[in-house]
Image: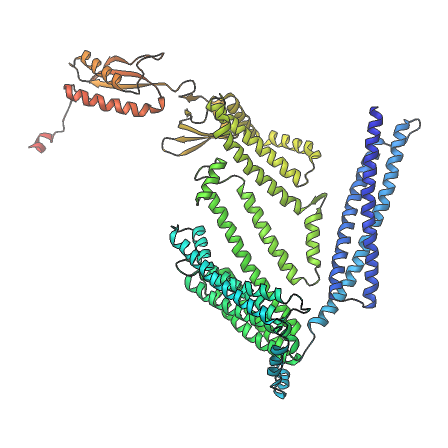
Amino acid sequence: MKKITCFFILLCCFLFSFQLYAKEMKSLEKMSEQVKEISKKIKRGKFDGEDLTAWTKLVIKIKSEASLCVSNSEAAILDLKEKMEGLGEKVSGEDKEVTRQRSEYQKQKHDLDKKLAKCNLYMVNGDTASKLISESEKSYFKQKYLAKSPNMIALITTYLDNPVALLSNSGDFIVRHSGVKEMDVADIAASIIVIIISIFSGYFISKKLLSIERRRQWQDDFSENFFRALLVTLAYSFPYILGSSVAALSSVVITLEVEEVPFVTEFFVGLLVFFITITIIRLLLDPPPPAKLYISFTPTIAKSLAKRLRVLAVLGLIGYMAFYTIFSESITESNILLLRNVFSLFFVINMVWTLQVILKSPKLPKLRYISMLVIGVITLSLIAEWLGYRNLAFASRRMVMLTFVLLVIFIGISKLFRDLFNAVDDGVYAWCRRIHKILGVGENEKIPGLIWLRLLTSIVIWGLFAYIFINTWDYSGGIIENVKSYIVNGFTIGDFRIIPGKILWAVFVFGAIIIFSSWIRSQLENNWLRMTTMAQGARDAMVTIIGYIMFVVAVMAGLSAAGFDFSNIAIIAGALSVGIGFGLQNIVNNFVSGLILLFERPIRKGDWIEVGGTEGYVKDIHIRSTKIQTFDRSDVIVPNSELISNQVTNWVLSSKGGRAIIPVGVAYGTDTEKVRDIMMSIAEDNDDVVKTGVMPKPLVLFREFGDSSLNFELRVFLHNVDTRLRVISDINFAIDKAFKKEGIEIPFPQRDLHVKSLPDDFKNNND
């Protein structure tokens, strides 16, 4: 029965792998046929720009899949060769099972050789088609972008031949094609009434928003300033946005039955976009008072930049109405080209003005040289447009401007996320401090694992910028497809295949598990383990061990997500053993000592210990080292091996109690019985001293007759030895006060000096 089950499982696996193989080869064969058709069309010259873009993506896809097929086939062939070498050469009389297995391996190798040959053929076909497409792209785009139309002088000359044509065409358009004729008078009247009501409603909502702003007490931080600016900006802009929204919606509803979208509808939609753009500019750079600027910009620069951007928004609305609506269809081509040239002049002038404002900003030093480059490019594009190279001018201006705007936006997004992560790490805001509390992280401590999410966020942000940047400049789409292929399918370095997509996923998995482990440790330490009968030291050890286990899980999960082959773990373990034998003895010694400390617990977190001349409290016990905070508030890092191999004094290991000794000397002739009674009374009056129980009671000892004093000792046991220094100080103060009151003298050392001889001139000098 077991043999039948195993056979059935192997058969299912074979059929499944065969289906995958057949599906993969079928996909490659289909794409190969498409590549052949592409080559024929290119040779005939039957294509346009969109065809070239689609063909480029297809060729890159087949080359990527064929390359992956070659890599997988070669790896499978090498694996089969190792298995065949393991069986050895065929000998007479060998076991039938060995012969059958060798035949099976040879058959599989034969199939893989055929598959490898096909995949190599597909790669060759892809390379051939790629060269043809590349040559065709150069010819096509050269013809497209270097095409010349009438220059500015020719357009002005044509306009002067019939200067009233532009005005007559515009007037005719307004009368016949604006869309007003297609609307019913009642619909127009109803729309006007609804628009007026919406504007007044907007003013009402605006007053409500301003009253909310006045009633609230605002804090001076980023989030509060942002929400205040958002509230005030919306209050001032809401009537315009609501009115234009209702106007756009009304015009769309009224003209639903009209086949071609009328100009009036396009006008109101453009007006709505214009008001939204103005609102965003005002929110970011010039929020109305009492709101304040919340981004790190010089106020005067921000106001100037907002002013220039508003002018550009007006020009954008005019350009949209003139060149991207049905209005442009009613004007002759020469007049439209002339209007475009004039519009480009105003646009470039205002764009240069805007960039000069950015150049003056001390907050954006990195954008200065880029701004100068953009100024140069758009100026050259204007000259090219006036000379008649409009396709080249529009394409270069669009790509450069889009790149610059994207760069500014992504710099802002990057700074926003950087400030956000810094705020979370430093606990700047109340919600950040709540996150610290939930994860069990100290007020001045960084959140573990957040650095990996910070790194991943930066990679994603700038990776997205790179994608849009390449997509803007890559007219054929080939670079994007290559990048996608490298990210998804990876690339080979030696015998290793690196897949960036999996690596990014691994970084996210690792960081997420580390942050989750912080939450688990916090819950264990503050909630779950407190409900058990475990001692504090045992709870601390449990939390530390689980933290390290979660770290190992995070590492293993990250490696697994990155595609790490754990079959090589034996090789890695062997390399580690050699490393341990040669240079990692101390690290392993400290690691093992850390495990002993956690399980045996001769010292615990919070214990008062002395080791190697260092005295203080144990703050943390890690796998490699232990942190001790001295009474001077300095942190001393002690390797765990020293705590295991050297003598350690733990004042609070078995009990919090401990002894304090206070030596006192009194003058000769003092009533010793009285001294004993005073010291005993002081000890019994101190609340920190043990008077009853298993520990000895206070004791006064007359230790010796000293050179200058009668020496006593007051020995007391304390409830908590942590208070030892304070209790000794309190008792000393009390003894000094009591001795002064009773007239008991505490002598200072006295010495007799015997002079054997004096200098000859001593007497004369004294005289």
Q: Which quarter shows the N terminus? A: top right
Q: Is residue 79 above or below residue 353?
A: above
Question: Which residue is at a point 50% across and 26% down the rendered structure image?
Answer: 529
Is residue 509 or residue 162 the one in the foreground?
162
Snapshot quadrant of residue 294: bottom left
Is residue 13 or residue 448 the one in the foreground?
13
Q: Return the x and y of residue 483 as percentages of the image width and height.
A: 68, 53
Snapshot quadrant of residue 5: top right
Q: Is residue 490 above or below residue 695?
A: below
Would residue 144 be seen by someone viewing this image from the given angle? yes
Question: Which residue is at a point 40% across and 55% down the rendered structure image?
Answer: 211
Q: Return the x and y of residue 611 as percentages of the image width and height.
A: 42, 25
Relative side of 535 to 112, left or right: left
Q: How is the protein colored in the picture? A: rainbow
Relative side of 75 to 753, left or right: right
Q: Return the x and y of residue 596 as percentages of the image width and height.
A: 53, 23
